Image: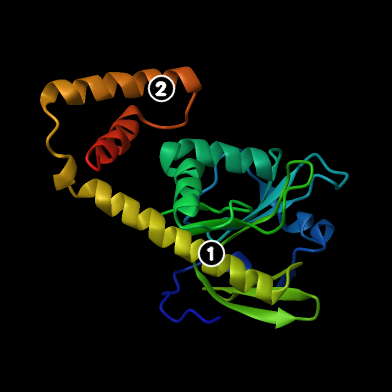
Amino acid sequence: MNQNNIVSTTVNPFWYNDVGCWDTRQPERLVKYATRLESDKIDVLQTFYLLDIGHLKCPEKALVFDRQRGILKSKWSTRQLMIRYSRQLGFSGSHLVRAVATDQGLSPHKLPIIHGEAILMPQTSAKRGMANWYNGLYLIDAVERPLMTELVYAGGIRLLIDMSLPMVDRQLKKGRQLQRGVSNYHQRRATPNQAASGLDGTDAQNLNRFADTVVDYFGIQAHPEEISCLTKRFLGTL
């Protein structure tokens, strides 16, 4: 895999130290380089790796690899960080990705979180509810190493992860296919569906009220207008 269409942007000089390739299989050696993350928010346009360190004897539960801020240590687990971020996306988060995967006949196993160009993918199935996550954004190459894979990010950042290259390639292919599906969904939303444009104002109000009820009753992480949009599109196909 080699992505030549990604333009490298400036990264924190921290990443130009003498470590070379960061080995995520030895998190105890990485903690000493980390500074504290004070919030439970991540920036998917800059965060390119989340590492679970809950098994280490330290107060922190995760390391956040950030292009601009270096390595950050967090008292929140990778699961907590990802759940918080996914909830911020509403329906456009995990719910939409799962719907696109079903529509495309893809496995619902190990689905990524997608936001624009960012594709955050779970490195492994979650254990104790935890997992490591890597970002497809700024990833320019993946190189096979003995029993592992080296991820090369724009800016010269290199990571070693405990994952085979064929598995990385399959996951990236699936993630980018889902990303295209999510992008197509948003493009369709931005373009009025002529087949569904026959609803008058009263019908639209009823649909909005119905959407409010559904979202509130089931506790769905979505905006009511998104439910209304999906309902209108469905009714337009009848």
Mark 1 and mark 2: Cα distance apart in space: 31 Å
Circle 1 is placed at which residue position?
A: 174
- Image quadrant occupied by the C terminus: top left
Where does residue 62 sit, x and y in percent of width and height? Answer: 71, 47
Quadrant position of residue 161: bottom right
Circle 2 is placed at which residue position?
A: 214
Where does residue 107 sit, x and y in percent of width and height? Answer: 59, 56
Circle nearer the N terminus (1, 2): 1
Residue drawn 68% across the image and 76% down it: 165
Q: Secondary structure at mark 2?
A: helix
Q: Secondary structure at mark 1?
A: helix
Q: Amino acid at mark 1?
A: Lys
Q: Residues within 10 Å of mark 1 (few under 14, many from 20)?
A: some
Residue 84 as seen in the image, left or right of residue 182 = right
* Front position in the image: 10 or 92: 92
Residue 41 as seen in the image, left or right of residue 182 = right
Is residue 236 something one can see in this rendering? yes
